[in-house]
Image (cartoon, grey):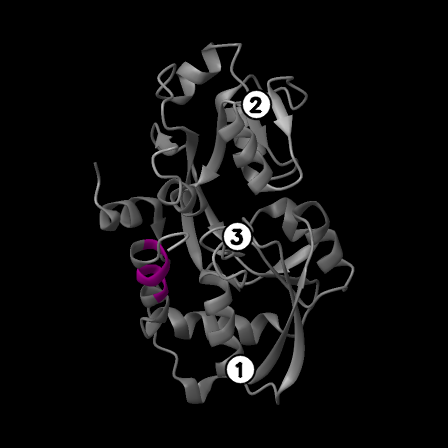
């Protein structure tokens, strides 16, 4: 079985910037209040700690560092994934974060930050699954079902990389949240959930053998924060992300959340 360090290297890779950015070079936003919306359903990026009930995760820590370095105050709000991109586009929130894949289609509605993480998609299955070991094996068994959120990268990967390209394929069962897809998988209502390695690893580590990842990666995706079109926050946040990359802060967050942290402990 791969080590935790090997899993981290294989599933999540930082996009490193070549030039250092010093804290003194970052803009000062003067203590302004910034409303950040999230879903709290995507461990270990952001989720509710089952033990303490607190909202925690990689993205919370990264946003706290960004806010500190740019001198702004964060006000957190929650909404569903289905509503998030449109709500940010409409200006209801200043920033959205929930492991959002950067795509050209989404860029038409919102502005993205520079990527802060790259992740690859894998098949998440029950721990005792032995009917298939790769995408071809899953696609060839017409009795098997996929759980997915509509409009997400995993949904389109399921349609075009695993199934037949039909977005209305009845083998895809739709759920409002990623967490709901995983619960359906555990209950046996679906047989596989496509997930990036970031979230998948979090669920596997907390499942006590109940879940596992199978097959190779089905593609990579870059994650970014989202903003209303034309937001003045994009450039400062990009500068802060670059600073976090170059001074090792994002490396430290990866170690904390992908190597050291264990769900429920």
Give the dominant element type of the magenta stretch: helix, strand or loop: helix
| In magenta stretch: residue 256 | yes
238 in relation to 128, above or below? below
Residue 254 highlighted magenta (yes or no): yes
- In terms of secondary structure, where does tag 3 sit? loop
Q: Classify residue 226 as left or right of residue 121.
A: right
Which label is found at residue 99?
Answer: 3
The label on residue 70 is 1
Badge 2 is on which residue? 189
Name the residue at 53% across, 82% down.
Answer: 70
Local packing at callout 2 (Cα closer than 10 Å; few below 14, some 14-19, many 20+) is: some
**Left or right: 80 in relation to 102:** right
Q: Residue at x 37, y 55 (%)?
A: 265
Separation of disc 1 and disc 3 at Cα? 21 Å
- Image location of residue 257, percent across then percent down: 37, 58
Q: Is residue 97 left or right of residue 90?
A: left
């Amino acid at each position: 079985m791969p080590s935790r360090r090997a899993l981290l290297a294989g599933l999540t890779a930082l996009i490193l910037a070549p030039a250092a950015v010093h804290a003194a070079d970052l803009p000062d936003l003067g203590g302004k209040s910034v409303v950040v919306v999230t879903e709290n359903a995507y461990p270990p990026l952001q989720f509710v700690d089952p033990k303490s009930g607190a909202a925690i995760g990689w993205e919370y820590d990264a946003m706290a560092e960004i806010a500190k370095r740019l001198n702004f105050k964060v006000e957190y709000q929650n909404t569903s994934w289905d509503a998030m991109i449109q709500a940010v586009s409409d200006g209801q929130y200043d920033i959205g974060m929930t492991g959002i894949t950067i795509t050209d289609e989404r860029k038409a509605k919102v502005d993205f930050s520079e990527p802060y993480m790259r992740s690859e998609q894998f098949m998440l299955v029950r721990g005792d699954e032995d009917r298939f070991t790769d995408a071809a094996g899953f696609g060839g068994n017409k009795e098997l079902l996929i759980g997915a959120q509509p409009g997400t990268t995993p949904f389109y990967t399921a349609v075009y990389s695993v199934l037949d390209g039909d977005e209305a394929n009845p083998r895809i069962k739709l759920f409002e949240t990623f967490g709901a897809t995983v619960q359906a998988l555990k209950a046996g209502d679906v047989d596989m959930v496509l997930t990036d390695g970031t979230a998948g690893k979090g669920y596997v580590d907390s499942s006590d053998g109940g879940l596992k990842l199978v097959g190779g990666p089905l593609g990579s995706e870059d994650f970014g924060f989202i903003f209303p079109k034309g937001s003045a926050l994009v450039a400062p946040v990009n500068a802060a992300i670059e600073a976090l990359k170059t001074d090792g802060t994002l490396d430290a967050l990866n170690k904390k959340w992908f190597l050291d942290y264990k769900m429920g402990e």
